[in-house]
Amino acid sequence: MLTVSVKWQKELFPKVEIDTSQSPYVFKCQLHDLTGVPPERQKIMVKGGLLKDDANWATLGVKEGQKLMMMGTADEIVKTPEKGPVFMEDLPEEEQMVAMGHTAGLFNLGNTCYMNSTVQCLHSVPELKSALVSYPSQKSSELDHSSHMLTAATRELFNELDKSVQPVAPMQFWMVLRKKYPQFGQLHNGVYMQQDAEECWTQLLYTLSQSLRSPSFSENPDTIKALFGIELVSRVHCQESGEESSETESVYSLKCHISQEVNHLHEGLKHGLKSELEKASPCLGRSAIYLKESRINALPRYLTVQFVRFFWKRESNQKAKILRKVDYPLQLDVYDFCSDDLCKKLEAPRQILRDEEGKKAGLKAKEKTSGSKDNDVKMTDVERPSNESGESSKPTSQEDKKSHLTGIYDLVAVLTHKGRSADSGHYVAWVKQESGKWIEFDDDNPVPQREEDITKLSGGGDWHMAYICMYKARTVPK
């Protein structure tokens, strides 16, 4: 390394370093930075003539402290524009939110990716946020203290995420979650253990269902049920005794069971709605096997699907993971899984939806004959009150009161797991914004993603694979 001085016009640049292991062209680039003279215009006097771009420094005889002369004309200085470019990070936070949509991440507090991904998915439900805003700060006498604290912490965390573009530390929410559900506070060698995101999702929704339907919360007594509740009607049959009964239950998710025959979500849901159970048979006076076949009898605004990827492996005494690839669609139609009664209620709204989509595609909507009995029935269905329209309970907003469900849903969030064990690995949320753009929430690092890449999270290897999918109902006006 040599140090020289360079004289150019009336200016002298002292202590310019020459890296003799590099070509003279690199030195000329240094001078370009100092003077603005492009390398091709530089004429530098050295022993034997002008300095060439590919010359060998060892043969030029340049010495330490030597003064070199340079000639050449600098590029024209570009005038500074009156109004310079405005970068996203220079905008006020409020304007950043408008430009980018919600992009605030959540800091990982130590194996809390299961919690962060759950929060990001549920935070994308505007109706849930509205219900939480209306939640009173004063605890009702019917609600236990820990449930009230977790609901209030959820409201505050959602509020922080809405106001900030910088990552948020969910410390208060995490503390209250552990207090309400101690299993999330398990330690191993002094470190908080990884937990199951589906368990966190289920427990949080259960708590919110209790607190948001308490008598003091008059907004809607069944908010969570209306948003996420799925009513199932089941036929329970014993082939051995011929006994048959029916039962109704409300769940917050459909299960996609995975086996060698399952390659698509539709097939997994079909398997999930059938199960065998062993119970006492009054006719036989002993235990017998019953077949339980379920159908959907009422639908929610947001349909949650859990891929049953984890199972208990007896030989290793731990949860193992099914890595099999199971494809899922951006648009899910659950009509085939509905009860006969619900199918009838969905027919008219589905026809309206088809007509609307036909118009958008430039097709003529199906002509209606005024004297048709079928059409009279369909009009009656459309005009039915909301509690008879296939919805799981009372509407949650003014918009809900003016719309019918169709049984068709659009994908709005995917919670993925990467790794081979439920007790390790990493959870990430992939959430569709109101702008239509998708964002991958990897803890405190939100990254925009293309929609076509979202359905590639279907499994088959060690990459992120869908564990929970959340779909939003496609509705039509009444």
Image (spheres, rainbow, N blue to C red):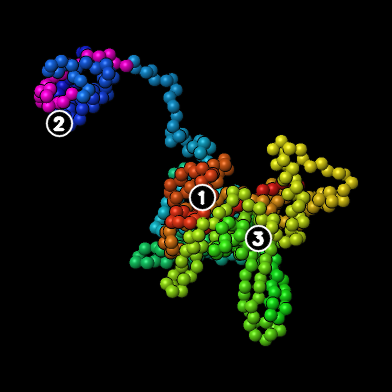
Quarter-of-image position of residue 16: top left
**Disc 2 marks which residue?**
1
Q: Earlier in the sequence, mark 1 or mark 2?
A: 2
Question: Amino acid under label 3?
Answer: Ile
- In the rendered image, residue 25, in percent from the top left (x then y), is placed at 23, 25
Q: Earlier in the sequence, mark 1 or mark 3?
A: 3
The label on residue 456 is 1
Helix, strand or loop status at disc 1: loop
Whole-angstrom CA distance, mark 1 to mark 3, is 27 Å
For residue 345, side relative to residue 65 (left or right):
right
Against 240, is 5 above or below? above
Q: Earlier in the sequence, mark 2 or mark 3?
A: 2
Helix, strand or loop status at disc 2: loop
Helix, strand or loop status at disc 3: strand
The one of 56 and 216 positioned closer to us in this rendering: 56
Task: Say whether residue 56 is magenta.
Answer: yes
Quarter-of-image position of residue 255: bottom right
**Disc 3 marks which residue?**
230
Whole-angstrom CA distance, mark 2 to mark 3, is 75 Å
The one of 298 and 41 positioned closer to us in this rendering: 41
For residue 412, side relative to residue 340 (left or right):
left
Q: Are marks 1 and 2 in contact (CB under 8 Å)?
A: no
* Residue at x 59% of width, y 54% of height: 135
Q: Nearer the viewer, mark 1 or mark 3?
A: 1
Question: Amino acid under label 2?
Answer: Met
Which region shows up in magenta?
A: 55-75
Question: Amino acid under label 1?
Answer: Lys
